[in-house]
Image (spheres, grey):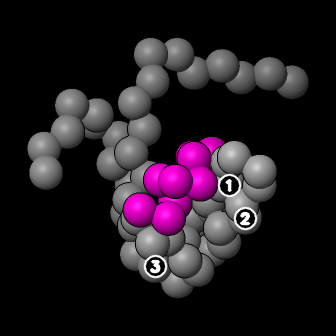
């Protein structure tokens, strides 16, 4: 698979919490936790579960920091 995104981070799924329509997927990326909000359908299609090896693929034009 080829991607236009340049930020591809390999990690391990630490949790998948499903809501009414969305799943929050937490991944450990070298000690940092990244959280993705994806559809329940996508989580089901990917068969995501705790312990899975996966990739966090980040494609963004802006990074916003607040304090």
* Residue range of the region highlighted in magenta in the rendering: 34-45
Give the image quarter of residue 25. bottom right
Question: Residue tagged by mark 2?
Answer: 17
Mark 1 lies on a secondary structure that is strand
Question: Residue tagged by mark 3?
Answer: 52
Sequence-first tag of 3 and 2: 2
10 Å crowding of disc 1: few (<14), some (14-19), many (20+): some
**Above or below 61: residue 8:** below
Q: Residue at x 40, y 75 (%)?
A: 53
Q: Position of residue 14 (x, y in %)?
A: 62, 74
Question: Residue tagged by mark 1?
Answer: 24
Sequence-first tag of 1 and 2: 2
Q: Position of residue 15 (x, y in %)?
A: 66, 72
10 Å crowding of disc 3: few (<14), some (14-19), many (20+): some
Q: Residue at x 77, y 51 (%)?
A: 20
Mark 2 lies on a secondary structure that is strand
The C terminus sits in image quarter: top right
Q: Residue at x 52, y 60 (%)?
A: 43
Whether the residues at callouts 1 and 2 have beta carbons within 8 Å, the answer is yes
| Horizontal arrangement in the rendering, residue 44 relative to residue 20 (left or right) | left
**Above or below 42: residue 45:** below
Q: Can residue 31 be seen? A: no
> In the rendered structure, does residue 18 fall within the stretch colored magenta?
no
| Horizontal arrangement in the rendering, residue 51 relative to residue 58 (left or right) | right
């Amino acid at each position: 698979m080829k991607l236009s995104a340049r930020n591809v981070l390999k990690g391990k799924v630490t949790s998948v919490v499903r809501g009414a329509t969305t799943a929050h997927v937490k991944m450990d990326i070298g000690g940092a936790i990244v959280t993705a909000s994806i559809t329940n359908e996508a989580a089901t299609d990917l068969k995501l579960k705790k312990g899975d090896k996966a990739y966090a693929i980040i494609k963004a034009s802006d990074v916003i920091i607040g304090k």
